[in-house]
Image: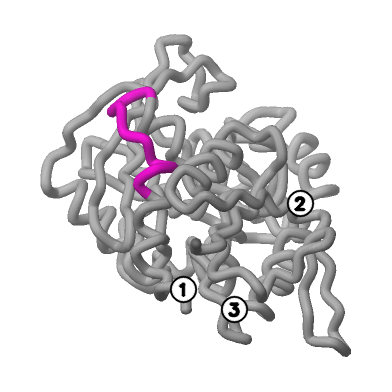
Amino acid sequence: MKKIGVVGIKGGWSSERLADAVENLTGFRLLVEPDKIRLDLPAGKVWHEDTELSSLDALIIKKIGASYSPDLLDRLEVLRFLSERGLPIFSDPARIIRVLDRLACTISLQLAGIPMPPLTITEEVDRALAAVDQYGSAVFKPLYSTKARGMLVLSPGPDARRSIEKYRENNPVMYIQKKIDLRGRDLGVVFLGGEYLTTYARTTETGAWNTTTASGGKYTPYDPPEEIIALAHRAQKPFALDFTCVDVVETGDGPVVFEVSAFGGFRGLLEAQGIDAAWRYAEYVQAQVPPCT
């Protein structure tokens, strides 16, 4: 019996589903809650409650926290300790670190020549105000967030400076992206083991500026042209993640990439395409883990 643990959130839909899939395949179930992981550095051991994690055959990271923050980087560093000591972890924590910070992910995408919306990074209010004027409408994105949480949409106007100053209080490094007309749809292009799996769309008819389910978005099936699949494949390749979803939007000038995610895609795949990503991922990991001796 292969002992494969799942790092995730107790009670979380995708975390529990993945742990169930692993159990159905292997007969072993362990959901590792990130905030209960303990590193005993002198002993060189990492524990989750009474389980010494290096005794497992592998770990799958589904969620490293309920919400994004720099604290998650520290949790990943503890798991990196295990990875460097030889425990197979999917995806490798060092690779997840590169996508968790929005700016780090963006820099990697830009260095790879991936088309993205126009972007300004600044700590200066005047420069941020100039970016809003230049773009006409801009989205201020926290460096650690998901599902549009904490994002601010600004257009030029008498209140723009005051809004930027207030935003900067909690976001000193400002990530300012030109607001793109989504035309009611963006795409999640999914890869497993670096190979294209499928695509789903997030659509909205509410008039919201984003397509997240929190803003009324729905998952729908979508068959993208080869151009989009090829772009998403190039975007995810530098990160070498075992499971990833590339966020793509179609514009009048061609497709552009918003980001690469290490955690998303399970619910969208199931609702839009009828694909059980948890089962597929569990099968993939089981095949990668060496046989028990």
Q: Is 275 one of the magenta-colored residues?
A: yes
Q: Is residue 18 left or right of residue 196?
A: right
Q: Nearer the viewer, residue 165 or 186?
A: 186
The amino acid pointed to by label 1 is: Cys
The amino acid pointed to by label 3 is: Ser
Can you say whether 123 is above or below 146 in the image?
below
Residue 292 badge:
1
Q: Which residue is mark 3?
A: 83
Q: Secondary structure at mark 1?
A: loop
Q: Residue 189 sits in which quadrant?
A: top left
Does the CB distance between marks 1 and 2 fall below 8 Å? no
Q: Position of residue 46 (x, y in %)?
A: 77, 73
Q: Which residue is mark 2?
A: 171
Please report whichever mark, 1 or 3, sits nearer to the chain's N-terminal start: 3
x 71%, y 28%: residue: 158
Q: Is 64 one of the magenta-colored residues?
A: no
Q: Secondary structure at mark 3?
A: helix
Q: Is residue 37 visible?
A: yes
Residue sticking out furthest to the bottom: 42
Q: Is residue 139 visible?
A: no
Q: Position of residue 149 (x, y in %)?
A: 66, 35
Please report whichever mark, 3 or 2, sits nearer to the chain's N-terminal start: 3
Does the CB distance between marks 3 and 2 fall below 8 Å? no
Which is in the foreground here, disc 1 or disc 3? Answer: 1
Q: Position of residue 32 (x, y in %)?
A: 70, 54
Please report whichever mark, 1 or 2, sits nearer to the chain's N-terminal start: 2
Find the magenta span and give its range.
Answer: 271-280
Which is in the foreground here, disc 3 or disc 2? Answer: 3
The amino acid pointed to by label 2 is: Asn
Q: Is residue 58 left or right of residue 128?
A: left
Determine the CA span between mark 1 and mark 2: 48 Å
